[in-house]
Amino acid sequence: MNILYTCDDNYVWLMGISVISLFENNQNINEITVYLLGEKVKDKNKQILYSIAKKYDRKIVIIDVPKIDIPQSLVSTRWPLSAFTRLYSGQLLSHDIKKILYLDCDTIINGSIMELENIDVSENVVWGVKDCIGDLYRENIGLESNSLYINAGVLLFNLDKLRKIDIKRSIDQYMTKYERLINYADQDILNGIFKRQIGIVDPKYNVMTIDIVHTYEEIDILRKPTNFYMKCELENAINNPKIIHYTTNMRIVRPWFKNTNHPFAENFRKYMQISPWKNMELTEMYFTSKEAKIIGIIMKLPNRLAYAILGLMHSKIKPLAIRIRAKRSK
């Protein structure tokens, strides 16, 4: 089974903990090869990753990524260059690799993922788990209000099909039209350029923070998602998560911070404790942005009122504001 990560040197430790969880919980898979498309990864960290692979009798291949020609407007402090590397994986990986599972570094593999290896990917370019976004976000980026929209943190790529697409040309054409309307960077681009070539997998393979900390009814109020999972599907995933994805969500502190309040923090700490980073000193995280402070004030209101206001802000006001700014900047 082929696994792909992308990161720069700052996130190697996080990736390494994810890899350990992968190896620990998938000993039934005969062969696992992890590929890292790395940006300026130091030799010291490369050696640590190689030692992890050796311990589990697995293989890690580290590829130093050359400069990728992507629109400069996408490179920001929020989204590093490595966030876009996965879109070029067909070009950067050996053509002998036909299918690969991409994992974000902020994931913990909590069980066997053999089922993903057995998926027939021939019909689509990419497979993933539906994300809970509303119709206005979709319409902003050129999708129909009920189109499929997947989260980019866990992706199963059909590399043969991906290699037939001129990625740079596709991105350039897409960005010409939607550059000022993008909110989720490479995730929006991925959904935009592959919109008719996307497959769906069970949500247990990408259980996100929002799924864990909110009820199904709260998610409906907060995000007003279209083309999403049924309540029973999401609840089954939360009760039996194969991959936990520690996405940001409102005022939840993720488990690699000392003051974490994430409900699944122990799932992360368990693998950190058996990693080369077990003695790393964790820092604390505080919500200092203007948006975070506003959310904090709103959350002091009665729950029903707070959720109604936050839902209106996220699902209606924010995408409309993006649309208005885009028109004004033309």
Image: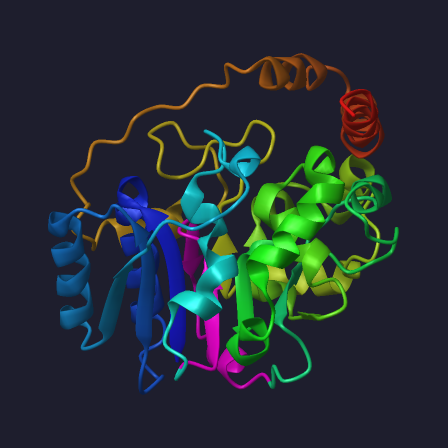
The answer to which of 16 and 164 lies nearer the viewer is 164
Q: Quadrant of residue 214?
A: top right
**Position of residue 42 measured from the top left corner of the image (x, y, whole percent):** 17, 46
- Please state if 282 lies on the left or on the right of 169 as rendered: left
Q: Which residues are the magenta region? A: 97-119
Task: State left or right for residue 248 relative to residue 182.
Answer: left
Q: Nearer the viewer, residue 75 or 104?
A: 75
**Total labels drawn:** 0
Magenta stretch containing residue 116, yes or no?
yes
Identified at 76% across, 43% down, the residue is 177
* Above or below: residue 140 compared with residue 85: above
State yes or no: residue 3 in magenta.
no
Point 12% across, 57% down: residue: 47
Snapshot quadrant of residue 32: bottom left
As drawn, which residue projects farthest toward the right? 145
What is the quadrant of residue 293 in the picture? top right
- Residue 239 visible to the viewer: no
Q: Quadrant of the N terminus?
A: bottom left
Judging depth in this view, the residue of 66 and 102 nearest the camera is 66
Left or right? Give the position of 299 relative to 164. Answer: right
The residue at 31%/53% (across/down) is 38
Q: Is residue 42 above or below residue 110?
A: above
Scheme of colours in the image: rainbow
Instruction: Where is residue 88? Give x, y as percent.
Output: 48, 61
> Can I make out residue 326 in this image?
yes
Q: Position of residue 242 (x, y in %)?
A: 50, 66
Q: Position of residue 266 (x, y in %)?
A: 38, 47
Which quarter of the rendered picture does the C terminus lie within? Answer: top right
